[in-house]
Amino acid sequence: MKKFINNVDDFLIESLNGFGKAHSEIIKVNFEPNFISRKTKTKEGKVSLISGGGSGHEPMHGGFVGHGMLDAACPGFVFSAPTPDQMQAAAEHVDSGAGVLFIVKNYSGDIMNFQMGAEMYSGKNDSIITNDDVAVEDSTFTTGRRGVAATVLVEKIVGSLAENGGSLEECKKLGEKVNKNSGTMGVAFTSCTVPAAGKPTFDIGNDEMEFGVGIHGEPGRKREKIQPSKTIVNNMLQAILDDLKPQKNEKTLLFVNGMGGTPLTELYLVYDDACEILKSKGIEITRSLVGNYCTSLEMQGASITLLKCDEEILKNWDAPVHTAAMRWGM
Amino acid sequence: MITETKGYMSVNFLISQAKNIQIVIDQNAAEIEALDQNIGDGDHIFNVQRGLKLVVELEDDIKNLPLQKGLNMIAMKVLSGIGGSSGALFGTFFMSMAKTPDLDKDIDFKKACEMVITGINAMKERGKADVGEKTMMDVLIPVSEKLNELKSGNTDMKVGLSEITKIAEDRMLATKDMLATKGRASFLGERAKGHIDPGARSSQLIIDTICKSLINK
């Protein structure tokens, strides 16, 4: 394992320390229990948004704390859900009386810990669960689809509504709409190495890729030989379109997300391929996002998310945001 | 007949069991980690090891406390110090054990069974998982059912505990051929088949260690 590490046990704390110092004008890192909050207090009457999950997906979620997005983020150990006391402390810290909306990715550990945190918090609160990953079959008897990159879009769009006075109920409703209108498909070329493990999570051949990979390096739909980008992108989009079934000329946001180890040069190439394929199918791309937003440590690979947009979604997407990882309009 | 020995559940009993379990889990860490990397993401073993370390380190703080207080402190430590599914589930286990009535009286074997059954039921509720879903509940639920039978039956305690170790092992092995419908392995579909569930394996080792220490008491 080659990583910037002093001591494996201090990995998370030292990284959080650095994050706090680098973005001290936007956020504050609180310890024991660990959570990242905005530097300023939540204004009265504004619904607070709190997300969180295992670390190793940076900039998600700490990088999305700030004006127009989250009020707090709770980082767990690498790839392990955060603990209920973190969510409770974060909620007590940020709630201005208008209530708290927890944004949770659909993984068993996250669901259970957020549920317990919500039970321990005495103030008004509600939750939305993201499950945009089309690689996994959904059924009422299973854990269901994973919550992956579309969580970023949910946090941005609902964050804007909350900033502009949306109620807890309205925020939840919009978040559920964005989640329902999104589909994501991921592909990995290499594994990632969890610091505590010291070795790659899975073995993968030099000429292989994992199609439908999750954001922790957990396996996906199938193992395949690597193909030209156009073919990979076409297969990814096909899986998304089969699920989302967008109308002809429907407006969409196209989000190409890097898993951490793939350069932006390649992500833009993927974006180009995706644009051409979607254009040929009569799907209109009205907004874009390209970059490393929901990562899996140093994994090479990318995910594509397509979000069907109506006016409400577009308006809130365009609204000003100022966080460590996303900033426009202010 | 169940032997009416006193002191089956106390703070010191829990700490000494945690120490025994720590040794066994460490001995089998590589195997559990490999199982998790096959069908999960490899964090389970670190979560279990971290949890055991935290409980063992609590010894000085809790050794003189009444059982209920001790259990609550263990629950909070596990809940806040582990994370992932394991933290939530084992935290829930201790938290609900602490809610069993009459913990200020001496705990006989029957009462200890009742506490463990209460704890496992709460885990089942929290994780919304049942048997046959390729999780730790595949081991824990049948163990809980057997404890319920022992609690009210006439089986010799040591014979009963030995039967429990057998049940735990069989049920752990049976997860190998299951499709997962809960937890991270559920995302794998058919590909999860052929691998023992890491949570089922760690739970079986925990049950095995506790039962054997009681049998050899």
Image: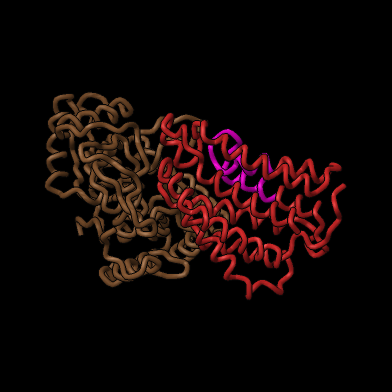
Can you give x and y, in whole percent of width and height, for residue B71 in the image? 67, 63
What is the quadrant of the N terminus of chain A in the image?
A: bottom left
Q: Residue at x 53, y 37 (%)?
A: B134
Q: Quadrant of residue A276?
A: top left
Please state if A9 lies on the left or on the right of B207 as rendered.
left
Instruction: Specify the segment rendered in magenta.
Output: B118-143
Please state if B201 lies on the left or on the right of B168 as rendered.
left
The number of numbered discs placed on residues in the rendered structure image is 0
Colour displayed for chain A in the image of the structure: brown
Report whether residue A99 is seen.
no
Can you give x and y, in whole percent of width and height, for residue B24 in the image? 57, 56
Can you give x and y, in whole percent of width and height, for residue A267 in the image? 16, 44
Please state if A279 lies on the left or on the right of A168 as rendered.
left
Q: Residue at x 44, y 34 (%)?
A: B192
Can you give x and y, in whole percent of width and height, for residue B47 in the image? 49, 56
Q: Of all residues shown, which one is farthest toward the front?
A: B216
Q: Residue at x 27, y 62 (%)?
A: A3
Report whether residue B17 is seen.
yes
Q: Residue at x 60, y 46 (%)?
A: B204
Colour displayed for chain B in the image of the structure: red
Which of A7/A297 is in front? A7
Which of B27/A17 is in front? B27
Query: Does B58 appear above or below B205?
Result: below
Q: Is B130 in the magenta? A: yes
Helix, strand or loop for the magenta stretch, by majority: helix
